[in-house]
Amino acid sequence: MIEAEIKLITGAGTLSANAVVTVSGKIRVHGYCVFEKPGQHPSVSSPAKSYETKDGKKKWLPIVEVIDPELKRQIEQAVLTAYARAKAERQSAPATSSQERWW
């Protein structure tokens, strides 16, 4: 069983949410990101750390790499489902209510 917790983000360009993923109640991975460009479907990025190359370019090194394609698909689907639900809750909430969640 895959579970995802979402924290919606505003004002960070295409970065729309951070996620924590729990796999089978045995491992919890922080640092998944949801990116959404206007007019496109959201995408999920695995946890990664940025670094700078000798020539000053920014690169990303994965922290967690899911090797099994089916498990990777399940994780991405769980994150996107939780993201869609969080967005819907935020849109239906009164203007004075905050829907941000911390874990």
Image (spheres, helix red, strand yellow):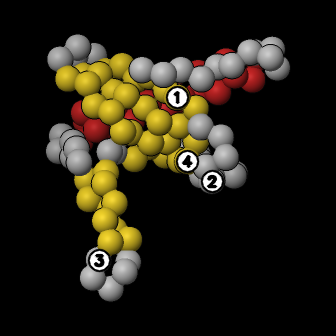
CB-based contact (under 8 Å), mark 4 and mark 2: yes
For label 2, the SS is: loop
Q: In this view, does 67 lie above or below 25?
A: below
Q: Are discs 3 and 2 less than 8 Å apart at CB?
A: no
Quarter of the image for the C terminus: give it.
top left
- Sort mark 2 into few (<14), some (14-19) or many (20+) by Cα contacts within 10 Å: few
Q: Nearer the viewer, residue 47 or 75?
A: 47
Reading the image, the residue beneath label 2 is: 13
Picture coordinates of residue 91, whole percent (x, y): 75, 23
Amino acid under disc 2: Gly
Q: Where residue 16 appears, x then y in whole percent?
A: 58, 41
Which amino acid is tagged 4? Leu
Tell me the CA gap for discs 1 and 3: 31 Å
Q: Which of marks 1 and 4 is nearer the N terminus?
A: 1
Furthest-right residue in view?
95
Position of 38 relative to 30 (above/below): below
Query: Is 17 placed above or below 96 here?
Result: below
Q: Does residue 51 show up? A: yes
Q: Report whether 67 appears left or right of 49.
A: left
* Residue denoted by label 4: 15
Q: Looking at the image, which residue is at 22% across and 44% down?
A: 64
Pick the residue in front: 70 or 85: 85
Lateral position of residue 30 relative to residue 18, left or right: left
Residue that label 1 marks: 7
Q: Name the residue under label 3.
A: 53
**Which of disc 3 and disc 4 is earlier in sequence?**
4
Kind of residue indicated by mark 1: Lys
